[in-house]
Structures are given as structure tokens and as C-alpha cells.
Image: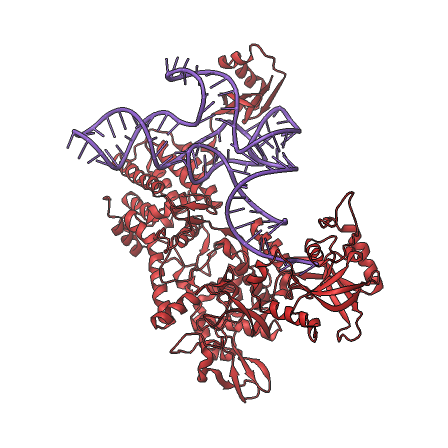
Amino acid sequence: MAENNFKQIEEKWQKFWEATTAKDDSNKLKKYILVEFPYPSGSGLHVGHAFSFTGGDVYARYQRMKGYEVLFPMGWDAFGLPTENYAIKMKRKPQEVTKENTDMFRLQMKRLAFSFDWAREINTTDPQYYKWTQWIFVQLFRRGLAYKKEMPINWCPSCKIGLANEEVVNGKCERCGAGVSRRNISQWIVKITDYADKLIDGLGETKFIEKVKQSQINWIGKSEGAMVKFQISNDKCLIKELEVFTTRPDTLPGVTFMVVAPEHRLVNGLKDEKVVEYIRKTRSKSDLERAELQKEKTGVFSGLYAINPINNQEIPIWISDFVLSSYGTGAIMAVPAHDDRDHAFANKFDLPIVPVVSKDGWNFKEKAYIEVEKGEKFEKMMKLIEEKGIGKRSTSYHLRDWIFSRQHYWGEPIPMINCPKDGWVPVPEDQLPVLLPEVKAYEPTDDGQSPLSKIDSFVNCKCPVCGGEARRETDTMPNWAGSDWYFLSYVFADQLPSFAKASAGKRNIFMENNERLNKWMPVDVYIGGDEHNTLHLLYSRFIYKFLVDIGAVPESISEPYRVRMSHGIILGSDNQRMSKSKGNAIVPEVVADKYGVDVLRMYLMFIGPFDGTMVWNENTLMGVKRFLDRVKNFTLEQIKNNFVSQDKNGLVINQLIKGVGEDLDAFGFNTAIAKLMKAINDLKTVTKEEMKTILKLLAPLAPYMAEELWSSFAGASEGYKSVHLQSWPEVNRKCLEVENIKVPVAINGKTRIIIEVLRGDINNREKILNLVYSNEKLRGYLSKRKVIREIMVPGKMVNLVI
RNA sequence: GCCGCUGUGGUGAAAUUGGUAUACACGCAAGACUUAAAAUCUUGUGGUCUCAACAACCGUGUGGGUUCGAUUCCCGCCAGCGGCACCA
């Protein structure tokens, strides 16, 4: 191998290697290893992709060598704004752009030797695929989990388009930077809140790390409390009672006023000029403005009063935007003595503060007294409330229902039809998919409607129920829709074409593949970024659980992912997030051109712990390059010497097999590489079998070099068997047993000397202590002091207390 | 404010059912090879003291605690990172 011919070598083996595909009928134990599929952007594979995919690939190759039938698939999450925007700008079809991008990604991935199962490649923008994304939506609708509702959305007045929450950055439009306001638009909503408890409980069945579990639990934000009814004392008011949610019913005696959100229905019909003005102002405020003004409370007295049901006192009802219309009932009972926000409000508007409990010397004018423990008092009051019939136990969640409508072109059309007679009717399953029509312009319209609304041939249709004239829904689905079930699609990707035909439309691809789903699900390891720990993970778990509930996927597997692995991020050499505009981005292709794919892969794995935040450093990369060069030279030297070895390497080699295996099992790629480096530093000569072992251990990490070196001595010309098809080496336990065991001897816990003890003597206390006390050096320490205690951990250490 | 995480050499980092702290790599220094440089190889490299070696002492953010023994466990504090946040 000459210095710069790694490219030929890479091409040679790429051609030689057979495509790896998981066999459904294999007798081996399965392992489903999933990496989050990428959005195929126009700029190609970036370092973040290369990093996480390499980790997945090393792990997948390792598991294959260990004898598992490994499913390691790849696909494209290709719907989305960047492609749409690019298409608008360049006046091209998003379909074509997507095709180009995915072709580029696939090529780059193949070059980086990612052993993806290309026979199972999927693409969310493929009608064969999104037919089932739409099918799932229809099932949600049929079971009452999807409904249309007028909801305030983020509105960009400059782009004249509705934005998803994730498209709003710091209250500003992601595209143009204009401030985002609110606007009411009728939208499809999915009732994910119905699954809140299931989504919390299901976490118990997974092996997600605490961080992920906690963030999901926090996101769902379950709190236990009570709904309490307050009678309104003004007889002219149309509404007779005001219901509030509270987690602290025990503070009910301290309620001195109430507050409702400006959107609360109570305020309808209020005529007072100041009230009308306040409502007008706050309703037009954006979330950003509301958040910015968060320190200073604003509000207005409604003129209405309520009766505190526990002590019959009359208390005023205020209106303020610090109360959210979207949580609880949109109204609160205010306990200024024991809640910071209520306290601030009371101080600002000079409302009374009445303590329920107190602490010696507490100044209630200055600060609310928050009692963390509620336990007994809570239960006592709860009982009283229920007896008096003024309220009941209740649970509230931070999780909101999922706004499922987007007014964009490049997404899955929502398969619904609006009939003047029958209302909203789903497109029958055998007529799916609703194809995305080809249009001339993808620009959003002035009124915030999807560009699809301008295509009459798409919009006008017949009602599936009555056959009359009807209009098709023109909103498309959010980006999350396609990724909600993609992990299932890989299992039966080969079936997508045959299920695409309308004639097959009555059949359900999930149910007909239950056997295969049973074999492959759940995903054993799901590798992805922390940014998807809440939304994507929650949405896809929800959809999966829904599919279980409707009997589409086997109920024996209740959670889709067993283990979630976070991959870290790689910062530019300036310690900043890589980005093209900052000029600090590293392009994997360029690095591969310069140093070769193996160096790139190994460097990415060596740079730090797999879930860490790392900084790109070309110097460290040179260390990896040197190592691979050393491996090459070492191997060639051993071949030249005909593998004549006088050295006894049994211990080193077997420790290496054990160590590398344990590290790879735990995604400890950096330490696995360190162990390989140490072995190559320590070993002088090896036998042929030992050399083979080393190359097998190296194969998942540096597939090209391992193969090239393997082929240079290990293979016959005919019937050559790739190093990647070899079995992972077994540890020979006997070789790990050493004759002399090194035992550190410490005085008062500080190591002073190391003695060597025969294996058979590790439990022989007398003999070891003899060894210790006869040690010349130790005598010096002990000459003037008295040992009062001797502690011996067999084979581990000896500690003398003086 | 709440939740989660992290803190170890000049740098990236190892080591946690409590048992030799700093593996591996970078960088640096010295040497070999070379006319020279690059590359490569060898050796050294936590701090203090010392010409140097030996020895000694100190040392895993910080202050305590438990223990024969703590980077690891417990309590308090400090700093940083990530997420959520007027959620009643």
C-alpha cells in the first residue's frame, strides 16, 4: 500500500463488498440498530451525520461479527421547508431536488463504508410511503383523535404564512427574521393528550437514560390537584360559576382574588372601557411580547366578584395575561401569601394577602411563603371539598394537543374532505394516497393558505359519503408525521410498492406484516440527537402506541425503542457550532479525500465519548493517522517475518479482545481505540492467528484497511472470505489468568509499594504479610511506627494502618 | 425559578459494585536518521522542593462527612453546559 492510494483501495473494496441486508428468515438472534434518518439537504452529509452514523455502523458491524442478524437501515426524511424554499428560489420541483440530494447522500454514505441495508431504503416523500402516513391520520380521525379547531398560530406578517412553533426562533420568523404575531386559523389537531399517562407509564419499560426519561416526563408535565368551583356573585353575569385548577387546594382559605386570562369566555360582553382596551391590547400581543413583559404584571379589574366556597368571602375577579388560556381552565384562584406570581400581582394592584400557614417572623408583604410539603393538608382539604361538593380531584398536563396542520406545499396532504352535508369525511383507505399535485408555484398565498388551495383540480372533489360536490383539505402534515412510523417501515420496505396500488388499498400493510414486526421490533438501540429527545421521541412513541391500540402492530411489544443512545455534537475548531456562514464547518468528504475514510471514521470515534461535546482538532486526527500507518507497517513486517514470534502474547491479546468487546458494547469507541493503540505499541512480534485477531478487532472501525491487510495474507485467492464476515474473536479465559498478581501495598490508604503474589497465594494472608514486612523499602516507613491494623483484599490490595 | 448533566495535567480525555489517579492521544522537550527540513523512530513530560537522582510532601472545582482507604458514596457551596419556564 503506497502512501496515497487509499482511494483505489476504498473503491476496490466497495465494489467487492456485497450489500448487507437483514434476512427475515434468519435463525440468528436479531438486533435492530437504528440511527435517526437525515433530512437530505442540498449541502450533503455533514460531520454530525458522519459522526453518529459511524458510531452506528461500528456497532452494527460488531454485532454482525458477534453473530447477530442485524437490521441497520437508512432512509430519507425528505419533506420540509429548506427544500421547498430552495425549489421556490430556483424555480424547480421539490421532487427533483429531493432526488438529487438523496442520490448524493447515498453515494457519500457508501463511500464512508456505512453498512446500511440499502434494500430497505425508504423515503417519506415517496407516495408509496406517505400513503401510510395518511392512512395513520385517517385512523386517528376515525377514532376521534383528530379534530379541526380554530387555534391561534404563529403568523409571520412579512412572509404571510403560518409558522410551526419550531419555525419560530426567539419570537422571530426563522426565514425572514420578522416578529411573529398570533392569528386564529382553523387547523387539524391530534389528541396526543389522551396518551399522556400511557406515555409516562411506558417509559418504565424502556432503558432510556434518565436525562431522556426526565425530559419526556417534564414535557408532559403531569400535576395532581383539584378543580374547584367559585360562584359568581354578580347576578347580571351570564356565567354563574368560575372553575379553576389548583395543585394546592389546601391554600383555599388564602384566596383573596381570582384572575382569568384575556381569552377567557367570562370577559365576553364586558363593556367597561378599560377592560375592553386591556383585552384588545393583550390579545394582539405575541408570545414574545408576553414573555418579555413577564417581570412586570399587568391587569385590569373585571368588575365581577366571586365567592370563596370555603369561607364565603366575596373576592374580586381580575383579568391578566399572566394567566394562560391554554392551561387548566384559563382561570386561577390567587393565593398571594403562598405563590410568587399571585404575590407580585397583589402587590402591584394592592390586593390583600392572607396567610394560611406561616413561619415565625415571615414578612408576607415582602415575599410569599412557599411550603413544599403538601401531603396531609392536601388530602384533608380534598376530602372537605368533595364532601361540600365544591370541587373534585383532577389532573392537569403541560402537554398540549398537537397542531397537525401546515400551510406549505412540501408535505403529506392531509387526507380529508369537507362536504357541505356530511362535514369532515376522511378519504377512504382504498383511495389513498392523496397525491401531492404538481404545481407551478410553491409560494404561500396571501391569506395563509397552502399553495394547494389554488389548484382547483385538487381542491374540488366528490364527497365519499354522499357523492356530492365537496372540497379537499389543502393543509399538509408537519415534518414529524413521516418520522413517526419510519422505524416500522424498514421492516416491510419491500412491500411498499405492492401495497401502493389502489387494489391493494383495503389491505393494511402493518397487519399483514405482523410476523416480521414481531421478529424485528422493538428497536434495540436508537441513536439520535438530544434535540429529538422530547418531540420526535414522544410523537413517535404516541403513534406507535396508537397503532398497538388499533391492532395494527403486535401488542406484545408496547414500546418501540428499547435503548436510546444520545450522540454528541462536534464543534468547529473555534469552539463554535459548525455552520457554513461561520466558515468553521468541516466537510467529511474533504477529510476523506485528504486522509482516507478509515482515518476519518477512526478519528470521529476517538475524538471523545460518543455522547460528548467535542471540538474538531486536526492535530488529534494526525495521531489516528499515525496509528493506522503503524498498524499497516506492523502487519507488513509480520508478513515479511512469516509471523515468526517468540513472544508470549496470550495475555495481551486476550485482554484486548475482552476490553475492545466490552467497550464496543457500551459505545465506548474512544477507549476501544485506545486499547488497540496500546496493543500495537506493546506488541513486537505476533503469530498469524494473533495478527488475524487484531485485524478482526479493527474491522468495524477501519473497514477498508482491515480488509486490505486481511486480504494481503489471510485469504486464499479463490473463496476469499472478507474480514467483515469473520466471527468476532472469543476470549480465552485461561490466557487471562496470570501467575504473578501485582498487589499494591498502602499505608493509611496511600500506595507505597507493589508486591508480586503467586496466583495460588492470594488468599494466604500470612504469606502475603510476610512478603510485605520483609520488603526493604517498607521497613523504612514502618521502623518508627506501629501497625495497628492490617487490611487485605485478596488479589486487590493490602492496607496497613499505623 | 425548575429539571437534568458536567467539573481530573498545557490540551482532548481514561479510571466509579470505593482499592496503584492521569490509560490512549495531542502538544512540548531532548536525542537518532538527514547536507537540511518534513516524515519516522527512541526517551522524557501533574505540581512543589532539588543541578540531578532518590526520597518527601501536595494533587481529581470547593468546604465538610462516612471509611482502613474517596475522582467514585453522602451533605453544603462555587462555576459551567443543556432543556423547560407566568403551567396555578
The figure's colour scheme reads by chain
Query: Number of callouts in the render?
Result: 0
Colour representing chain B: purple
Q: Nearer the viewer, residue A699 or A235?
A: A235
Relative to B48, residue A313 above or below: below
Q: Position of residue A609 (x, y in %)?
A: 46, 44
Relative to A29, residue A792 above or below: above
Residue depicted at x 27% and y 44%? A712
Residue A67 makes an appearance in the image: yes
What letter labels the chain drawn in red? Answer: A
Q: Nearer the viewer, residue A202 or A390?
A: A390
Relative to A465, residue A617 above or below: above
Q: Position of residue A122 (x, y in %)?
A: 43, 65
Residue depicted at x 69% and y 53%? A340
Q: Nearer the viewer, residue A392 or A234?
A: A234
Residue A294 falls in image quadrant: bottom right
In the drawing, does residue A776 fall left or right of residue A1?
Answer: right
Residue A37 falls in image quadrant: bottom left
Identity of the residue furthest to the front in this view: A273
Identity of the residue furthest to the top in this view: A784
Q: Position of residue A273 (x, y in %)?
A: 67, 72
Pick the quarter of the image with the C terminus of chain A.
Answer: top right
Residue A557 makes an appearance in the image: no
Q: Nearer the viewer, residue A167 or A171?
A: A171
Pick the quarter of the image with the N terminus of chain A.
Answer: top left
In the drawing, does residue A217 fall left or right of residue A707?
Answer: right
Residue depicted at x 79% and y 68%? A231
In the drawing, does residue A371 fall left or right of residue A288?
Answer: right
Residue A127 falls in image quadrant: bottom left
Q: Position of residue A309 (x, y in %)?
A: 82, 63
